[in-house]
Image: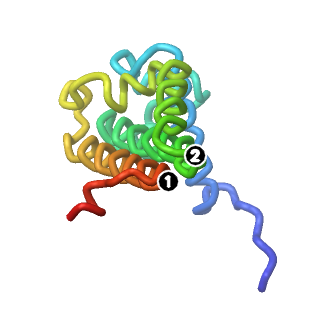
Amino acid sequence: MPAPQPATPGGPSADLDVREQLIRGALALITDEGPVDLSVRRLAKAADRTTMCVYTKFTNRQGLLEAVYQRAGEELLAHLEPHVRDGALATADAYVARARLDAGRYALLLGQPLAALGIPDAARVRLVADLGALLVRALEADGLPTPAASA
């Protein structure tokens, strides 16, 4: 197997790094200040990038927020996953602790209408379905009957 090649300036890896930096920067701003006030200009300044860079990577603010929403949801699910084997109460406790710790991200994910941010409602439907599946597995870990078991 060949050794990984270093990223070349302007190459595909460099693009992913910039995109990743922008997503992480947006998540940090949302964690601190909430999702409503996130602007492309503020993100660009915080990431030491130009607004054109943000638009190049995400087309518009809506594209950026969709990517950030998806990432925040993935991180929430990844945070909860290790607690599933300990049952529903442990999973619920981890969920509440995460919501309190990251109120801005919680507001983005579940605390306000997505239409105000230009994010399709389907994104929340997917997240809630994934959270529901995770909860069913936590209930199963407790040995409790679940909708799948009773069907």
Picture quadrant of residue 58: top left
Question: Where's residue 102, x and y in %?
Answer: 52, 23
Seen at 55% across and 20% down, the residue is 101
The amino acid type, in three-letter code, at marker 2 is Asp
The amino acid type, in three-letter code, at marker 1 is Ala
Toward the viewer: 106 or 34? 106
Q: Are marks 1 and 2 in contact (CB under 8 Å)?
A: yes
Question: Residue reaching furthest right?
Answer: 3
Question: Where's residue 100, x and y in %?
Answer: 50, 18
Q: In the rendered image, which residue does mark 1 sit on?
A: 141
Toward the viewer: 104 or 117? 104
Pointer 1 or 2: first along the chain: 2
Q: Is residue 151 visible?
A: yes
Seen at 61% across and 27% down, the residue is 48
Seen at 63% across and 59% down, the residue is 13
Seen at 21% across and 47% down, the residue is 122
Toward the viewer: 109 or 50? 109
Toward the viewer: 98 or 30? 98
Question: In the image, is 70 to the left or to the right of 17?
Answer: left
Indicate whether 110 appears above or below 68: above
Q: Is residue 19 visible?
A: no
Q: Name the secondary structure under disc 1.
A: helix
Question: Where's residue 135, x and y in %?
Answer: 39, 46
- Which class describes the residues within 10 Å of circle 2: few (<14), some (14-19), or many (20+)? some
Q: In the rendered image, which residue does mark 2 sit on?
A: 86
